[in-house]
Image (spheres, rainbow, N blue to C red):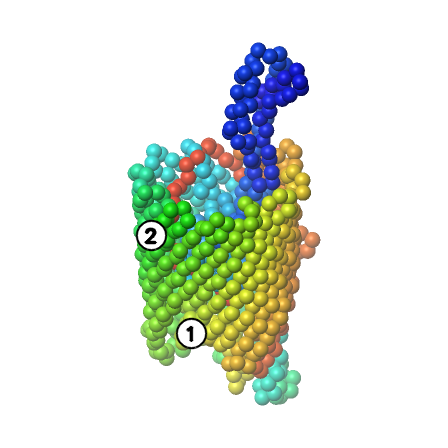
Amino acid sequence: MTIILRTLGLSAALSIMFVSASGVRQQPAEAGAAMTDTVAANDSADYNVMELDDVVVTASKPLIQTEADRLVYNMDEDPASGTNNVLDMMRKVPMLSVDGEDNIKLKSEENYKIYLNGKPDPTLASNYKEVLRGMPASMVHKIEVITEPGAKYDAEGLGGIINIVTVQTTRLEGYILNLSLYGGNNSLSESAYGTAKLNRVTLSLNYSHTNQFAPASTSGQVVEYTDESSPFAQYLKTARGKSHGQNNWGSLQMSWEPDTLNLYTVAASLYGYTGKSTGVTDVSFITRNPAAFTSGYTLNQSGVNDYVGASAEANWQHNFTSPEHNIVLSYKYNYGHQNGDAHTIYSDLQGFAATDFPTLYRNVKYPTHEHTVQADYTHPFGKRHTLEVGGKFILRNNYGRVSEYALMDDDWLMQPDKESDMKQFQDVGSLYASYIGKFGKFMTKAGVRYEYTHMGTRFHTPGHTDFTSNFSDPVPSLLLTYKLTDASQIRASYKMQISRPSVYQLDPTVDNTNPISISYGNPELSSSRTNNFALSYSNYAGVFGGEAGVGYARYSDMIANYSFTDEEGIINTTYGNIGSADALNLNLYLNARPCSGLTLNANGSAFYRIYKAPFIDLNSHGWGGYFALSAEYDLPKSWSVGAWGGMSYSGVYMQYSGGHSGWYGVSVDKKLIDDRLTLSLSANDFLKSHYSYNRTSEAPGYRLTSEGRYPQWSVRLGVSYRLGSLSASVRRTAKSVSNDDLSSGGASSSGK
């Protein structure tokens, strides 16, 4: 850059750039032109000319951004993304928490949806822990926390939507290929992504593979029977086990833009998971009559669980007078197949006959098929008003097949009372209308969605009753924002959500692998409903920024699992629309950049829940919450370091109270070869080798205490290299298929 100083009068003509924490702000073009004219008019004057080296001013995006209905965490601005997986990075995202068992919560809620590139992915519906552990954070561009989904989204996902946007959305030009490898004490992962553009066709490919392995874990349960009529006084169980799993995930996206008015896109994804586990469980019973008589046995178990998920979709977008005025037609197909095989061998029987505990083989299959057609129309009226209307139809078929065999006299005999073959169908038709208005500093978004559901179950095995249900649900929503400044706003919202039962909650097949504790679904479940109110304030201007909010939710006809003991002292666990809940949530996020290169974050939530379930004579309440801190610092010569930590208390639930958990970690990154090569090292929970938990639940007839211990620490070393350059990404239509109407999504109560 050339700087010209006039010696006479010591005046200067400088082009100034102001760099703030939120990016780069250039001086207006008129001012620059005026200075150029001034210099030109004085060409005859006496100048000293100094030639300096080029100065590069880099404008970085802020780590956190807010929009009217969402918060954005720019993953590519976080140096820790070089070695961590996506599940690790979610601990640092505002309004999200990840406990010691890797269960994700959004604003303390477990009912939400996880999207991949703006759409639900079948691989995340029931296996989000495995998928996110196997997805390197370097493949993710940003994570969006959508707290106000609005009427155009399905009426499900009580706490909101977590949208993971992968790197193919980055604007590049030509081609790019990124290769990564990272490994540590409990996993080894390889990944690759590439994007290329040829004329009007753009193609993006992603692939990752993760091999997971971990040392053995231990767990235990103590059941104290409070019902004096129970034949048992106590039930004791200790278990030791280990597992090993592999994840493979790939996706393809392609777009074709023949002209400025039309855009065609296709996309496909494939996910596969295979997990193997072995374990030994010791079981003891202490009877009440005769007093203190102890019996028991040992279970030697091994199993294989496989899951395959695939999706394919096609979209067409037609623009009218402007890109904002468009119509989008979409079709999507989702397929999933979960298969589980388990072998159980009983040994060391005390007080039991060998014929009562034969060797067992159990197979579970859950294939699913889903077809969706959707139409969305967006029409702006001037600069202030926008109307969105659309409709969707989902044809969904889920199948559940359970078979069990017992080894009798060297022959495998099917157990008819353990067999189940069912088909669940769910047809959902919906229409929505949404209005967006902008009036100066005010913005309003109001909408209503109507959904009609025809669902039921057909059984192909005797002993079960078919059923059919119909639901008609109008679902309103309202969002109001007031923009105080360019970086601060106040937001108030109301939304209604519904939650429908899933196939595993409806399946009445009895799982009695543990004869003292059995579980089964309830085919008579109906949908539950929630009314949510929220108020928040955000300000990300200057050195310090953040967001604070308060929310209230009223749950009715809750679908919850509950337990009870029968006349034989056996613990039964099933599902039911058994109660209601009131929840008050307080959320706080703070961000600071006190000096160049240093970013500090604090993220916390506190909640108070009140549960009422007259059906099981339950009335419980209590506080819970979490708090997390993180720091990142960019050092000279392309070095960066980071540290994070936090703790949580899961609070009170329907029939149990959770325990405490904590986490912490550090990372260091180094960029080489014009930032194309990145070396990363990170360590998590390295001061203790295992994580321990303890929780207690009470139900009519018993009190249960559970505890466990499993490995938690990890050390990872990673390397990634970028080839080529690119500036045209895969185009996406303005709307696409997003099915988010099931309660078995990203965070079910079972923690899948």
Q: Residues within 10 Å of mark 1 (few under 14, many from 20)?
A: many
Residue 203 visible in the shown view: yes
What's the residue type where badge 2 is placed?
A: Tyr
Percent x, y for residue 296?
58, 77
Distance between the alpha carbons at the discs numbered 1 and 2: 35 Å
Q: Residues within 10 Å of mark 2 (few under 14, many from 20)?
A: many
Residue drawn at x 32%, y 54% is 375
Which numbered disc, 1 or 2, marks the residue that appears first in the sequence?
2
Visible residue check, residue 273: no
In the displayed structure, 371 sits above or below 165; it is below
Taking the spot 50% from the left edge, 35% from the top edge, the residue there is 722
- Along the horizontal axis of the image, is 357 left or right of 91? left
Q: Mark 1 highlights which residue?
A: 525
> Which residue is disc 2 drawn over?
377
Badge 2 element: strand
Choose between 464 and 535: the one closer to the eye. Answer: 535
Q: Is residue 529 left or right of residue 11?
A: left
Classify 322 as above or below 465.
Answer: above
